[in-house]
Image (tube, rainbow, N blue to C red):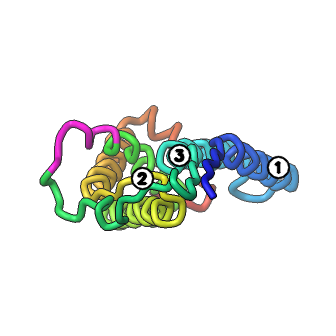
Amino acid sequence: MNFQIHIPTAAILGPALAVFALVAWARHRRGLPGWQGGSLVLRVVTALYAAAVASLTFFPLWIYGGDYRNQAEWVGQMQPIPLIMADITMAPNVIMFMPLGFILPLLLPRLDRSRTVLVSALISLGIEAVQLIQYIVFANGRAVDVNDLIANTIGGLLGYAALRAAQRGTATRRVLDKALPPSATV
C-alpha cells in the first residue's frame, strides 16, 4: 500500500502551546511562585522558543509507505565524522541554540557555563536521536549530522556568554533579575 501522510506543524504544536497557555494561566491565577511577572514571561518565552526549535527540527512530519518510502538505509543518513563537511551551513544551528544558552541559566540559576553547555549538547543529541528515529520509522529523509551537534553546542556556549555579558550592564542586569524567581541568584 502506497501512502503519504503530512502532519502539519500547527496540528501538533498548536495544541501543545494551548495546553501550556492553560496551565500557565491556571498557575498564574493561583499565584504560584514562578508563574508571576518576569518568571511567567520567561516561561512563555521558553515555551515559544521550544516550539520554534521543534518546528524547525521535527516538522512538518511526513510519513511515507510503500513505494513512496525512502529506500536508502538509515545508516546512510548519518554523518558521524565531525567537521568533514563543516561549512557556513552550520551557522543556523549555532544561531538556533544561542537562545537556549541564554535562557537555561535564567530558568535554572544553578547552571554554570559547563552545565549549560552540557545541557545544550544533550538537548541537541536528543534532537538528532529523534530525527534518526523519524527517519527509521517514517522514512522522512531527515539526516543526522554530528556537525549539528557541535554547532548547537557552540550556540549554547555563545548564548551563555551573551547572558553573562548582558548581566555586566546595570540596566540589563535589573531586567534579567526580574525574570528570575525571587529565591534565585545568578
Q: Quadrant of the N terminus?
A: bottom right
Which tag, 2 or 1, sits closer to the chain's start?
1
CB within 8 Å, label 2 to label 3: no
Dot 2 amino acid type: Arg
Residue occupying the point 26% across, 38% down: 89
Q: Nearer the viewer, mark 3 or mark 1?
A: 1
Residue 112 % position (x, y): 36, 63
Q: Nearer the viewer, residue 123 or 11?
A: 11
Residue 47 % position (x, y): 62, 48
Dot 1 amino acid type: Leu
Per the rendered image, the range of residues in magenta is 85-92
Q: Nearer the viewer, residue 25 or 55?
A: 55
Q: Is residue 4 above or below residue 74?
A: above
**Crowd around label 2: few <14 · some 14–19 · many ≥20 (10 Å):** many
114 relative to 11 in the view: left or right: left
Task: List the residue tagged with mark 3.
Answer: 177
49 relative to 18 in the view: left or right: left
Confirm whether residue 182 shows in the render. Answer: yes
Separation (CA) of disc 2 from disc 1: 32 Å
Q: Nearer the viewer, residue 175 or 72?
A: 72
Task: List the residue tagged with mark 1.
Answer: 22
* Magenta span includes 11: no
Tally of numbered tags: 3
Task: List the residue tagged with mark 2.
Answer: 142
Residue 78 % position (x, y): 30, 61
Residue occupying the point 49% across, 43% down: 56
Q: Nearer the viewer, mark 2 or mark 1?
A: 2
Decide whether the magenta segment is chiefly helix, strand or loop. Answer: helix
